[in-house]
Image (cartoon, rainbow, N blue to C red):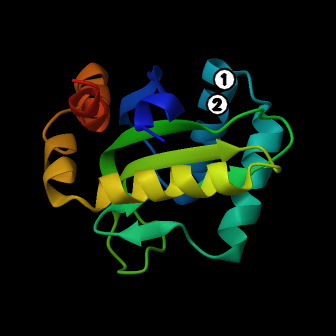
Amino acid sequence: MELSEIVRVDAVRSPVKATSKKRLLQNLSDMADTVYGLPTASTYKALMEREALGPTGVGRGVAIPHARFDEVDRVVGFFIRLEKPIDFESVDRQSVDLVFALFAPKSAGAEHLKALARVSRTLRDERVCAKLRSTFDPAALYAILTEGSAEKAA
């Protein structure tokens, strides 16, 4: 599964202002409604329920909030570059500025896990994160995220 299959160009936002994790998750829910037609309230509830299980801040300034719920019919995602890092209760206690959110159907077992693995692999790459932190341009961010797909297709 490639990131170009998960995230659309219009689902990359930057720079995004957020003052807290809760506010960021609300913003993500609003954006998911605008881009994917997902109900804001259901999306927000699903994200908050997932965060209650344990924070999705994976370290090195990266968070991968994700949730499963009935209102989505396939795995979709959002990428956000925050204007200023925020506390996300990350495992390494570093503030987060790169956020990749995933939304999956409740029935998407392997597909959800493959998407999480792909996002995690991409954002563990220090070179990719450095490139993402070098720009606030959404089109450039999308190109950086999906450049691995283009290389495999060539």
Which residue is pictured at 72% across the width and 59% down the height? Answer: 48
Quarter of the rendering containing residue 90: bottom left
Badge 2 element: helix
Vertical placement of residue 36 versus 95, above or below: above
Q: Which mark is residue 36?
A: 1
Q: Give the crowd class for mark 1: few <14, some 14-19, many >=20 residues within 10 Å.
A: some
Q: Is residue 137 left or right of residue 72?
A: left
Q: Which mark is residue 32?
A: 2
Looking at the image, residue 76 sits to the left or right of residue 108; the answer is: left
Q: Choose between 48 and 65: the one closer to the eye.
A: 65
Q: Which amino acid, mark 1?
A: Tyr
> Which quadrant would residue 26 be assigned to in this image?
top right
> Callout 1: helix, strand or loop?
helix
**Residue 79 x, y percent position in the rendering:** 43, 38
Expressed as whole percent of the image width and height from the top left, the position of residue 121 reads 35, 58
Label 2 Cα neighbours within 10 Å, binned few <14 / some 14-19 / many ≥20:
many
Is there CB contact under 8 Å for labels 2 and 1?
A: yes
Question: Given the image, on which type of amino acid does mark 2 rest?
Answer: Ala
Question: Which residue appears at 46% of the width and 45% of the height?
Answer: 18
Quadrant of residue 50 within the rendered picture: bottom right
50 up-or-down from 71: above or below = below
